[in-house]
Amino acid sequence: MIVWHAHERCAVHDLAFLPGGRLITSGDDATRLWDVSEQTELRRWEDGYALHLAVSPDGRTVAGVGSGRLWRWAVDGDNRRALSGFVSSTGFVTFSPDGHHIVGDGGFDHQLRRWVALDSRESPHGWGGERTSSSPPTGPLLFSPDGRLLATLCEDVSAAALVLRNGDTGEVRSSLWPSVTTPRATRLAFSPDGKLLASIHGPTLVLWDMVTRREYGRGRVAKKPFMGVTFTTDGSRMLTASNDTYLRVWTAPTWDQTTIYGWDAGKLGCVAVSADGTLAAAGGSTGKVVVWDLD
């Protein structure tokens, strides 16, 4: 296990491994790139308060929201660009699985927007459908592993449903409705085979069967909310970070909780797994990052 102080005076709100697991990005007061084995900072992008990060599949680009804009940073240099049409203090961002597009939610005109990842050129206006609510939701969005679906929040701010859109056109395909009253989702994670979708709703974790489009199950371990969720690359385990300082491991096929980790890192805000499946990482309210072997 490796632990280091990544952010001096603030919490670590998001983490994302680059392919290979040697490098990891962390976000809060600035977006930083770290060498995991040496715990050394390789790069710092001073573009504001980055709460949500995404790394391109080829590992060459990092995207995140900071200073009211959605930024695209080059991993191998200081090149950066603010993506057009996005002005917001909060927001979410994701890459398509083929790496061709960046999708953001939370811009000033209440639309889902898509950009060409290579040159940050915006795709045709209105992709994904216009938000019609006077107080449009800003929330997590994530492509299914095959890129066919994009999971987002429902446009109705009073509903906790998830909306599944066509990954190419943005057209709404179906909605996922919780079986009981549930807060709106704050984080999403697809299983590697795309058969399950995990969503965090405060202190409740919901698993969705993507074949039947119904709840597969749900978990609740404390009154404290879940903050992060991800699957291992073989799909056999699910990791959750909680605001009660504990990292929990849930195991297939029953998805019962099997292991609990506790570190001196404060309340945990995020969790990530490397693409090769060998490492996991969590970030805490004390500014510390914890990395450990999964095997």
Image: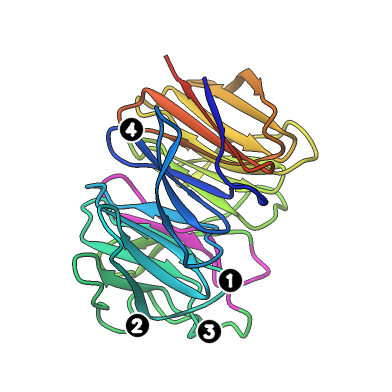
Is disc 3 surrounded by few (<14), some (14 to 19) or many (20+) residues within 10 Å? few
**Mark 1 against mark 4, which lies toward the viewer?**
4
Decide whether residue 158 is among the magenta residues.
yes
Report, in whole angstroms, how far the alpha carbon at label 1 lies from the one at label 2. Answer: 17 Å
Circle nearer the N terminus (4, 2): 4
Q: Please name the amino acid that badge 2 sits on.
A: Gly
The residue tagged 4 is: 22
Q: Are marks 1 and 4 in contact (CB under 8 Å)?
A: no
- The amino acid pointed to by label 3 is Thr
Tell me where residue 70 appears, x and y as whole percent. 42, 71
Q: Which mark is residue 132?
A: 3
**Amino acid type, mark 4:** Arg
Q: CA distance from mark 1 to mark 3?
A: 10 Å
Q: Dot 1, how many residues are within 10 Å of its Cα: few (below 14), some (14-19), or many (20+)?
A: many
Q: Position of residue 265 (x, y in %)?
A: 67, 33
Quarter holding residue 36: top left
Q: What mark, if any, has residue 137 been given in the picture?
A: 1
